[in-house]
Image (cartoon, rainbow, N blue to C red):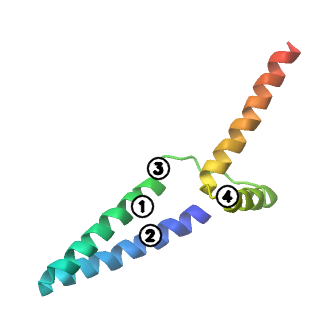
Amino acid sequence: MIGISSRVLLSISLVIVGVGLLDAFIGGDWDLFVVFALSLVVQAVVWFRHRANRTPVTLRPDLASWIERESQRTGEPFDDVADRAIAWYRHGLFIGGQSEG
């Protein structure tokens, strides 16, 4: 749910910057045009990064809030904390499965 709202906000922001870019171009204000163009490029990179091929996963509310708190505590993105937590869990399953056999 967080990813969807971020993409929507980024999309709206890209439209606003695009309109500003067009207005600066029509008005001949080249300094402002460059600022809008750079802003458009940076936001487009962030937008495409959010659209990376990730499988959507539904989490229990308590796990999602833990990941959110951990993300805020460490300063890492939510997705990185979730990836690391799943990797730790998977590693534990793999090691546990090997020691039993």
Q: Label 3 vs label 4: CA separation? A: 19 Å
Q: Residues within 10 Å of mark 1 (few under 14, many from 20)?
A: some
Q: Do the residues labelled 4 and 2 touch (CB within 8 Å)?
A: no
Local SS, label 3: loop
**Identity, as a three-letter code, of the amino acid under mark 3:** Ala
Q: Name the residue under label 2.
A: 10
Q: Which mark sits nearer the N-terminus, 3 or 4?
A: 3
Q: Mark 3 points at which residue?
A: 52
Numbered-mark total: 4
Q: Which mark sits nearer the N-terminus, 3 or 1?
A: 1
**Identity, as a three-letter code, of the amino acid under mark 1:** Trp
**Image quarter of the N terminus:** bottom right
Q: Which mark sits nearer the N-terminus, 1 or 2?
A: 2
Local SS, label 4: helix
The residue sitting at 21% across, 72% down in the picture is: 34
Q: Mark 1 points at which residue?
A: 47
Q: Which mark sits nearer the N-terminus, 2 or 3?
A: 2
Q: Which mark sits nearer the N-terminus, 1 or 4?
A: 1
